[in-house]
């Protein structure tokens, strides 16, 4: 099987409509990537791994080394989806040259096909710089978690007319700069709808309504690994409950010495007669 390509994803949207929505989930490990890969079009190695894997409270302290280690694992675990890797805070914002060096290193050391960066109009020249030099870019506008210290929290964006207009201008700038897809996070439905209608590349929503050309969720949220999740998450399973039940059963079996049992023992070789 040949891996999906960046142009194939971009080409899903024709004359402003997307017949087949773009399916994206985050992945951080090789085995999870293997399980998700056949069902997805894109796997995102999100800097959400800061919270999900490392127990950090924001994405601001995620390092490039973390992204590269997990990115390489996800590429090794997948053969079908386009793998996209988040550039972490502080590794791309200063200049197009800084972003190019970071993105090139990420692609060389992981084998991923594309990178994602948070930002609007200010970042558009950087997106253009990378795209013109052969690095496919996914944009990310609306609620941009790396800017949590500036935004003051994770509330939905675009409720006021001024903020709605700014987010739409951000989306247009990033799309016109050549991004092949645009993550739209945490915006009110009319803004997501207007952006999707206005730009040529597919929009991938998270907390951004079904008006988008595709959807993405953090896989651990979607699997029910966390007690508290944002309003926009649908829990498709309760993995935390499964883990709790299994851990309790294991502990009980060790304590009552019913594990390991007959079938789980190595026995010495019986000498041939
Ligand atoms: O880091 C991440 O997981 C993301 C998605 C939620 C879009 O950026
Ligand atoms: Na992210």
Image: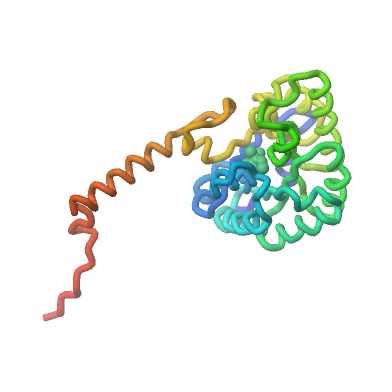
Question: x, y (%) of residue 84?
Answer: 67, 48
Q: Position of residue 257 (x, y in %)?
A: 19, 54
Q: Is residue 55 above or below residue 143?
A: below
Q: Nearer the viewer, residue 68 or 147?
A: 147
> Residue 133, percent across and down?
85, 55
Q: Quadrant of residue 68?
A: bottom right
Residue closest to the eye, 252 or 217: 252
Q: Nearer the viewer, residue 168 or 148?
A: 148
Q: Which residue: 59% across, 36% down?
A: 217
Which residue is nearer to you in this view: 174 or 164?
A: 164
Residue 175 in view of the camera: no
Query: Which residue occupies the extreme left position in the image?
Result: 273
Q: Is residue 212 left or right of residue 35?
A: right
Left or right: 67 as drawn, with respect to 172: left
Q: Residue at x 76, y 53 (%)?
A: 91
Name above or below for residue 45 compared with residue 241: below
In this view of the protein, can residue 230 be seen by the observer? yes
Residue at figure coordinates x 80%, y 24% from the top left = 163
Quadrant location, the C terminus: bottom left
In the rendered image, residue 167, in percent from the top left (x then y), is placed at 80, 29
Total label count?
0
Quarter of the displayed picture in which ligand 1 can be seen: top right
Query: Colour mode?
Result: rainbow
Viewed as shown, does residue 264 lie left or right of 217? left
**Point 63% across, 33% down: residue:** 215
């Amino acid at each position: 099987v040949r891996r999906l390509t960046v142009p194939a994803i971009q080409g899903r949207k024709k004359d402003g409509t997307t017949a087949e929505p773009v399916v994206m989930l985050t992945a951080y490990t090789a085995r999870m990537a293997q399980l998700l890969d056949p069902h997805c079009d894109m796997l995102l190695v999100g800097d959400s791994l800061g919270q999900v894997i490392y127990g950090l409270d924001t994405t601001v302290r995620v390092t490039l080394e973390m992204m590269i280690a997990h990115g390489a694992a996800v590429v090794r675990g997948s053969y079908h989806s386009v793998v996209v890797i988040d550039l972490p805070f502080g590794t791309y914002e200063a200049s197009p040259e800084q972003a190019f060096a970071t993105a090139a290193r990420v692609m060389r050391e992981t084998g991923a096909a594309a990178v994602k960066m948070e930002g609007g109009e200010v970042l558009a020249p950087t997106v253009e710089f990378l795209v013109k030099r052969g690095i496919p870019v996914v944009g990310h506008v609306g609620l941009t978690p790396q800017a949590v210290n500036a935004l003051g929290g994770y509330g939905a964006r675009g409720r006021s007319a001024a903020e709605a207009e700014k987010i739409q201008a951000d989306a247009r700038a990033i799309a016109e700069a050549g991004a092949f897809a645009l993550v739209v996070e945490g915006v009110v439905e009319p803004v997501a709808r207007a952006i999707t209608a206005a730009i040529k590349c597919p929009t991938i929503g998270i907390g951004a309504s079904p008006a988008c050309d595709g959807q993405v969720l953090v896989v651990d949220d979607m699997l029910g690994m966390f007690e508290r999740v944002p309003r926009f998450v649908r829990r498709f399973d309760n993995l935390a409950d499964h883990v709790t039940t299994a851990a309790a059963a294991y502990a009980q079996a060790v304590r009552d010495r019913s594990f390991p049992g007959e079938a789980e023992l190595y026995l010495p070789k019986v000498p041939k007669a």
